[in-house]
Amino acid sequence: MIKKFNLLLLTFFQIGKIKYAPGSVASLITCLLFLLLINFFSVVILFIFTLIIFLYSLVAINNYYQTFDSKDPQEIVIDEFVGQMLPLLAFPIYETLYPTSIIYYCALAFILFRFFDILKPYPISYIEKNTDGAIGIMLDDIIAGFFSFLLMTIVFFFLGG
């Protein structure tokens, strides 16, 4: 039972099994889920939820890492969820810098996160190549999310300033 739950979580409810662009689909669904959940929960609650998912995913990936075929299996897309949530959770900062609709923040967060996650500029590429296991799978997406957050903050600072 727990094994099925872990695999379901790691594949983000089977999104990782999609043949084409499962990471992009997982990121898009994360944005849509965020738009829904932000109406019911505070950013702090969503951050705690994301942190719990991150920590649980580390354990689940370590338990099932040997069953996958590659170093960073395409089926595991929970890392996209966690990485995509980072720039989304910072939307109160963006609102302070440049007030607009939350949909625009989500769209830009999606575009920037996918840009950094797909192109993997340094240090993302270095971490992906040189870090094994659960940390390696999760960390490159977390840094891509951080880069997205950083770039969005800079852009909104100069737009709002």
Image (spheres, rainbow, N blue to C red):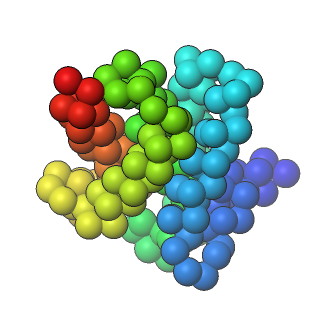
Figure disc tally: 0
Residue 145 image point, x, y percent? 36, 44
Residue 80 image point, x, y percent? 49, 53
Displayed quadrant of residue 49 = top right
- Residue closest to the eye, 32 or 15: 32
Residue 52 image point, x, y percent? 59, 30
Q: Quadrant of the C terminus?
A: top left
- Residue 103 in the image: above or below residue 159: below
- Residue 88 in the image: above or below residue 15: above
Seen at 30% across and 39% down, the residue is 152
- Residue 42 in the image: above or below residue 54: above
| Residue 145 is at least partly visible in this image | yes
Displayed quadrant of residue 68 = bottom right
- Residue closest to the eye, 109 or 56: 109
Seen at 60% across and 82% down, the residue is 19
Displayed quadrant of residue 26 = bottom right
| Residue 55 is at least partly visible in this image | no
Q: Find the residue positioned furthest to the bottom.
A: 19
Seen at 35% across and 27% down, the residue is 98
- Residue 44 in the image: above or below residue 26: above
- Residue closest to the eye, 81 or 105: 105
Q: Find the residue positioned furthest to the right.
A: 1
Q: Find the residue positioned furthest to the left.
A: 122
Judged left or right of residue 32, residue 111 is: left
